[in-house]
Amino acid sequence: MPSSLYLSLLKPEALSAEVHHVATEAMQNGYAGVIVAPVWTARVATMLQGSGTRVGTVVGFPHGSNKATLKAIESTSSIKDGADDLFVSAHLVHLIGRDFSAARGELLEIVRAARATRRDVAIHVIVEAPFLLSLGAGRSEEAIAIACRSIRESGCDGVVTASGFHRAGGASTAALDALKQNGEGLAVIAMGGIANAGVANAFIDGGADRAVVDPST
């Protein structure tokens, strides 16, 4: 049973039948959860009610350039629709600039709104670690450290390697290692470009706490 794995469908052109298929597959094959776009969250939550399969959705996805207030609204709306897990795309400019206060401030606004709606919702933050690692010596290490610290100190639960929609690429061993090194106290989630359970399990064996399979990759 792939209890550490999530199954996702996040391509913008996903049709209703595809969403139904991925939710059914996640439930029938023992995945921990399924991740879909916010527009599909209520439907999938209804489908999976009582199954034990968690419902995940994304916030500010994929680029993270929405205002924090809009991300907070999107978070609360998705929780009301039945989301158990939120995967929030961080505003990369804060991380590129190594601005801890701004990075933490954005996440605090989201966390406060989300937890006021449902206290036990899990909040994970996508940081595009492969891109941060491309910033160069010194800058990369500091950006990753600030990303993990802002996530931890804002009260979020996990740090996520990548969206899979950034030009720098998806999950990688280097990205996973960097997040594990800095992500004490956080769930480290491998996501982005993971096409099947075999690849996902390799990331689990490499130290990821969870991994997200996207068969459409």
Image: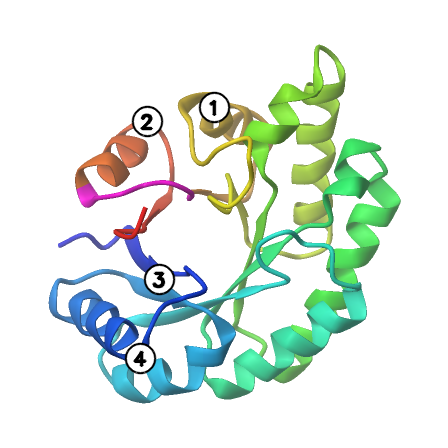
Residue 115: tell me if it is visible.
no
Residue position for label 3: 9
- Circles 1 and 3: CB distance less than 8 Å? no
**Magenta residues?**
191-197
Disc number placed over residue 16 in the picture, else none:
4
Q: Judging from the image, what secondary structure is the residue with disc 2 in?
A: loop
Q: CA distance from mark 1 to mark 2?
A: 8 Å
Asked where in the image residue 201 lies, by quadrant, the reply is: top left
Q: CA distance from mark 1 to mark 3?
A: 25 Å
77 up-or-down from 63: above or below? below
Q: Nearer the viewer, mark 1 or mark 4?
A: 4
Which of 98/170 is in front? 170
Instruction: Judge the density around disc 1: few (<14), some (14-19), many (≥20) Cα neighbours within 10 Å.
Output: some
Inspect the magenta stretch and tell me whether residue 195 lies in it. yes
Q: CA distance from mark 2 to mark 3?
A: 24 Å
Residue position for label 2: 206
Q: Nearer the viewer, mark 3 or mark 4?
A: 4
Q: CA distance from mark 2 to mark 4?
A: 34 Å
From the viewer's perspective, tell me whether residue 95 is left or right of residue 144. Answer: right
Which of 22/183 is in front? 22
